[in-house]
Image (cartoon, grey):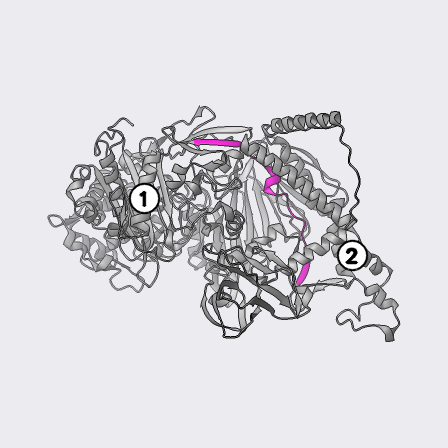
Amino acid sequence: MTATLASLMGSFAASRTARRRARNLRLGAQPAVSRGVSVNLWALLAFGAALVGAVVLALAARSLPAGGHAASSGSAALASLQPLLGGVTLRVPREPGIDIVQHGGAALVVASGMRLDAPVRIDLCTQLLDPQRPLVLPLRIGYPFAEAAALASAAGTPPRNVLLGMPGSAMPRVELRGDARQPLRLGWNAANGRAAWIGDAGTGVAQRGSRGEGMLGKQGWLVWKDGALRFTRRASNACPQAGELLLQRAVPGTAGIGLVQAFGHGLAPAPLQLAAGEYQVPAARPRGLEDALLFEQLQAHGLVHLGGNGLAELAPRDLAGWHAAAPDGRAPLPGWDKLPLDEEGRRLLDRLYYRADGAFVREQLRVFNSERRLLAWRVRPGSQRQWQASVGGVPVAQDEGLPVAAMRLFARLPEGWAPWRRVGAWDSGGHAPSALLALDASAPAELLLAGRVRRIEGASALTSSACDGRACREPDAVQRVRLTPLPGAQRILLEVEPLDLAQLVGSSDAAYRHVRVEQGRLVWHALPATESSLRPALAEVQLSGSKGEALWADGKASAAAQAAGLGPLLGVHREHASSVAGMLARVPGASHTARLSLDLRLQAAAQAALDCIALGEGKWDGKACVGARPVAQGRQAGLVLLDAGNGDVLAAAGGGVGKLDPNRWQEVRDFDRADPARSPLRLPAFQHDGGAERAPGSTFKVVTALGLETAARHDARLERLLQGQPLAEIDAMARESGYGFRIGAPSYPVDGKARVTNFREQLAGARAVEGRFGLAQAMTHSVNTWFAWSAELGDRSLGGQAQGGVPGVREIEPGAIDALRPVAGMARRLGFGAPLRLDGGLLPEDFRWSAWDALQASASMLDPIQTRHEVRQMAIGLRMQATPLQMALVAAAVGQGGLVMPRLLLELDGREAKVQPGAELGVRLDRIRAGMKGVVDRGTAASAFRGKEFDRLRHGLFGKTGTAPTGEDGMATVWFMGWLEPGSLPGQTRRLAFAAFVSQSSLTGGTHAAPVVAALLKSMQDQSPEQKGE
């Protein structure tokens, strides 16, 4: 009830503030009037009763589903279709399906009960034969592999990217080609079916038929019976010549929800999500767009424009009076003295300065200008002195906080500083290129400064660069400045040149700003309906652990949960909508009670081990940490422990993302908006940022081994290799097939420029058992060269030969590549490529998931492959991103013999999650298990489990280490994953799977990640909670 009342009162306050601001904008300041007030007791009581009734009604309304929101917000969003479909009635059917509906010169794609799948990205530079002549080679989509390879062979050009469809699929065969500097030509062949194309480079009329051609500019749809592909072409820094192509399949989604996009002659407004029903597109521009109309009219008359200094410039308020004055009585008015002013211009000027819509336009331009230049500073907490700012000699207003986009100047949220202050009005100082900051010089001062210092008076300075984010072009764009007053100085003056935010604004801030710059001119954008308007008000949430431990109540995590590191997962603020509590608060209903799978005792132990050993490289004995060092710059770590039998997540620890202070929520939220992948709200156990520091390294060899076992069922040569052969026979097999592999060589190919090398150049032949070497030995000693070569042998896209093949093959339909590239196919079966939902099926079917929701783990991904060498890199766990949850599930699958479905939410409002049995792997596992047992007993993790205290649990422990280099400095991301058999700990009745990683490590998986798991398992052994019946 507390959260509900707080949120409701917040809504009342927000509404009151909005009304007050609107009144003030329209009426201006009013003189205060003193008057007597008489209070009628009965009227007061009646008002109180009405207020209570309103609260009750509001509380009841909060528990209703959000069904009406889609319709209301959809009606508002329809205004974007007015230029193409004004007055048209469009229908979103309740029945699933997709079609292109023609309305005169405009076409409407209507996808009912469908959603867009994750995009497949194509770097179009990989399709260019010659970067100097950017002609796109034929990109084939939906073809069977043999047909695509034959077409490429006949044309005499090796295929680059081939996106395969499933055998027997209804998807048309598509070919895309053309000049990368122009719209691309798209052709399709639907065989016995029919398809329709609509794109933004056409006339707005869909082209239909079993075969056909169309043009792709930036967006387009190819639609056929029960299916569709959405094409999006966009600019790319990695490929400025041609950009990149995104392909998304329309797949079954939520019933009753439709995706709608209109196309006209060279136009394609953004797609809309609408509930099933009929909608009337406004016949004329709605009054809600009067601000946009005024802005366009002002631009047309030259009364607003983008100045040479990058700021928006408005005609002066007294321009009409200036024109009316005699020429010899006019003051200089540079920049505006040549502008003619007719009667319509005078009327617009009057609206701009004396009407409500003009006030709103002026405010939006003020916000635009304040965020085009950035000069911001923050001081240490407790500092009582205030810096004063002036531009062009004129004191200027200061704003709090940073623009959202400016958060991208930082790799992580700065800590230990007071809130940001910044210059809020640059237009007050004319064209001054810099600003002055002034401070009383009574004592030393320290500040974090976003801007470039050009001059310092009254103090000596010690500066250091502090700009380390994605948007930093120069490290001194942000500086840490320590100032010591000079003897006799009364004031400290800093002349600072602001940063140009033109390169930043337009990304993160674009969704929240009306005025933007496009192609060198100001453009007004209508804002889409916000997320908050589309979801119901927040419900009250209570969370408990698997054994009933209180985790969340009254809008905050319990002290025990926070101490166990669960704040980012459960929630750090009432507005933390992606947290578990925030997600459940978005579910319709006044309140929700949920039970999670987390064991608070195990969670606390996992977090303590991770903090001490993974982050600090110390030693943890189950109670205290000894010898920990300061955390290495940029280091993160994560650990997952789960029940391999039912997929329950027992512990999910993470660290290195930064401290989270609820009192700094606005700054945390803005950083999350600007750079969500690096946000301190991310969960290292479940989520990754898509970068190289989440490659699983050699732990992925377990996936490779499963793929090889799949291929070996139909390949006798590969079966013999996995089982183990004499060293001479292995070399003979490689030599006869033309491969540059030698079992005694430290690298492969032995004479290649791009090669795979064994860790510390170990010689695989020295690891043979009784003169034979196979999968078990390669796994135990993590032999890179053997796995790289074996993956080549098992990859049918390479044709079974040492040269040639089609390594760039990919899939547009899930499963299309499985038979060709068994390692990638096995990765997909195990969960790679798709987000992992942890709600146990308890959330409503129409729940609106977002990318970073805590109950949805990031999809572990394999990078696209273009070359044979990249096939080898994939085999040893490079060029990919994984989460501890995903790798723990891989270990659980080998231990269980079948797929394991994870879950974190066990119970919601009295409904229990069901255990979802996974399919059997269907391959030999004994050789993989033997190799993983060897890792612990005598291989790469043996040192972490060598002590007598591990004698009992070592017998049931299986594992695999991983060390993935991340640069030339010797640093790596290190891993350990595996499982513990039942009975290995006192009272343990379930198989436990685990995975842990540490980034920015100078050690190995066996010496840095494995000790984290070892400490956790030893703690469990010492405490033996299950033996005590707790």
Q: Position of residue 577 (x, y in %)?
A: 52, 40
Tag on residue 979? none
- In the picture of the structure, the residue carrying the numbered disc 1 is 608
Check disc 2: other Cα within 10 Å, few if <14, some if 14-19, many if 20+: some
Q: Amino acid at mark 2?
A: Tyr
Quick one: quadrant of the N terminus? top right
Q: Quadrant of residue 71?
A: top right
In the rendered structure, the answer to whether residue 797 lies left or right of residue 525 reads left
Q: Is residue 429 left or right of residue 957?
A: right
Check the picture and name the quadrant holding the C terminus. top left
Say which of 202 and 568 sits in front: 568
Can the viewer see residue 219 in this picture? Answer: yes
Q: Is residue 259 visible?
A: no
Query: Is 44 or 246 nearer to us in this picture?
Result: 44
Give the residue drawn at x 18%, y 46%.
724
Q: In the image, which disc is placed on residue 353?
A: 2
In which image quadrant can residue 744 be found?
bottom left
Q: Is residue 314 left or right of residue 189?
A: right
Q: x and y percent of residue 740 in the render?
A: 25, 59
**Vertical order, 674 against 95 (above or below):** below
Q: Locate residue 875, reporting x and y percent.
A: 31, 51
Within the magenta stretch, is there residue 1011? no
Looking at the rendered structure, the secondary structure element under dot 2 is helix
Up the image or down, 1013 lies above or below 864; here it is: above
Sooner in the amino-acid sequence: mark 2 or mark 1: 2
Seen at 19% across and 52% down, the residue is: 730
Query: What amino acid is found at the position of numbered circle 1 in the picture?
Result: Ala
Q: Would residue 525 be counted in the magenta stretch? A: yes
* Residue 756 vertical position relative to residue 484 in the rendered view, above or below: above
* Residues rendered magenta in the picture: 521-543
**Residue 825 point in image, percent of width and height:** 36, 43
